[in-house]
Image (tube, rainbow, N blue to C red):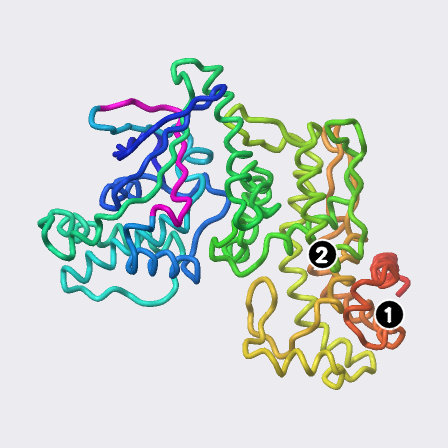
Amino acid sequence: MLKKKESVIIKFDFSAEQTVGDITKIVGLTMAKYLVPIIDVLDLEANPRSSKTGPVTAAIQESIETDPTVFPFKTKGILLAASQYERLERNRVKITPENPAIEGILDGGHNTLAIGLYILQNAMEYAGTTFPKGPKTWNEFKALWSANRLLVESYLKGSDTDAQSSALRFFIPVELLVPRTPADSACVESFKNDLLEICAARNNNVQLQVSDKANQRGYFDALKEQMDQANPTVSQRIAWKTNDGGEIKTQDIIALVWIPLSLISPVKDHNGRVIEPVLAQNIYRNKGGCLKQFEKLMSSPNVTAETGDGYKHELCNAEVSSAFRIAVELPALYDYIYEMFPKLYNAAGGSYGHITAVRSLNEKRKQITTPFSAREIETLSPDGYIVPLVYGLQALMEKRVVNGHYEIHWRQPPMPFLQQNLEKIVANYAGLFSMCDYDPQKLGKNAQSYTQALGAFKMALAGIL
């Protein structure tokens, strides 16, 4: 990870520059061997997505191998940004990114990864060391790079006539964005504020996901921090950033977050319009919409405030924070319901294993584990069967006044409640299956499923189920 105030020197060939408003763009070509210090120092924290190997990186490396002289005209190259810089002799620019969250490599992460792996593989083969096969994420590459950095250095010191060393004599297009006047604090602040939108626009070869943009703005930070504390095993499995290596999609978590978030006091957007909570059934059928509505909620001035550090926001709403404290418990509760449901459905008189959707799901999957903690279980369940029951947990939540403001709290500890009452709740809920032809899609998308599950929880809470 980039250390604050750490500098890197970029050597340009055929450079030119353009200045519009508060931004200066320096463009040129950089020989591959001069990319090494960039890889040493910079990271992809400022890039909305991380990078991983695949068809894109393979195509880049093939292009380098087959026609390196044409390569700089076939790629957009790498886009860098730094709020502080210094012009040096011989077309060199020394950059000192101050905030790795918004400065560094803004675009071209796959180019950097592909070229970095190409350099590393050449260096390791030059030293007679075996290059490890298999797919690699950016973080895995950086670890491998650091472990073999001395081999790279030795490789770079090889003679220019050496066939291996000359393999790095191809050019990469590099664009560097800097503030027009780095000594002017207002100019620098304006420059920083524009970086996220530049990132989003320049990452247009694959549409920038809502989750990546929300992550860059800091909208997940408070939730992630609470998840790290409450359930680090699950938190480590969440792909808070695209290609970050997590197996759990961010939108799956955010959909669950709306269960307690739906109870908070109304908040308004920048135009004074109330931001509505998502429909219960959308937690299953429209997780993308849940994510978009979450981004809208978190952008509300009633919920987050700018930190003054680029475009980052921090949570300033105690009620939302309390909803997050409830939400981080939901993955474990989901897994418990998921694991217990087949047995409890059978106890209610059903034959779970004979349901076509259940049988088909279990025949196709080799790993039979819970969705969030990946704990081994006996039977997989379609999510459409489970999500309404998880939504029913909202009956155990309430809004209280604490220190003069509202907070969301559990009425009673949820896990002991489930252990005592889930069998009765499932028996009440299972009647919906025949009405929906045992189709998990119909069950998960039907508003009545959520009303029934919520009602069953309320009756169990009141002791009348």
Please provide percent x and percent y for residue 241. Answer: 52, 49
Q: Answer whether labels 1 and 2 touch (C-beta < 8 Å).
A: no
Please provide percent x and percent y for residue 57. Answer: 39, 57
Point 66% across, 78% down: residue: 361
Q: Pointer 1: residues within 10 angstroms few (<14), some, or many (20+)?
A: some
Please, is residue 127 above or below residue 298 in the view? below
Q: Earlier in the sequence, mark 1 or mark 2?
A: 2
Please, is residue 330 above or below residue 199 in the view? below
Q: Pointer 2: residues within 10 angstroms few (<14), some, or many (20+)?
A: some
Please provide percent x and percent y for residue 245. Answer: 47, 57
Q: Name the quarter where the N terminus is drawn.
A: top left
Q: Amino acid at mark 1?
A: Asn
Q: Amino acid at mark 2?
A: Pro
Please, is residue 445 above or below residue 314 in the view? below
Secondary structure under badge 1? helix
Circle 1 residue: 428
Let me know if residue 364 is in the magenta part: no
* Chain part drawn in magenta: 72-88
Point 60% across, 75% down: residue: 377
Point 81% across, 62% down: residue: 445
- Seen in the image, is 324 located left or right of residue 169? right
Q: Quadrant of residue 103?
A: top left
Circle 2 residue: 414
Disc sitting over residue 386 in the figure: none
Q: Nearer the viewer, residue 389 or 168?
A: 168
Secondary structure under badge 2? helix
Q: CA distance from mark 1 to mark 2?
A: 19 Å
Please provide percent x and percent y for residue 354. Answer: 75, 86
Point 52% across, 52% down: residue: 242
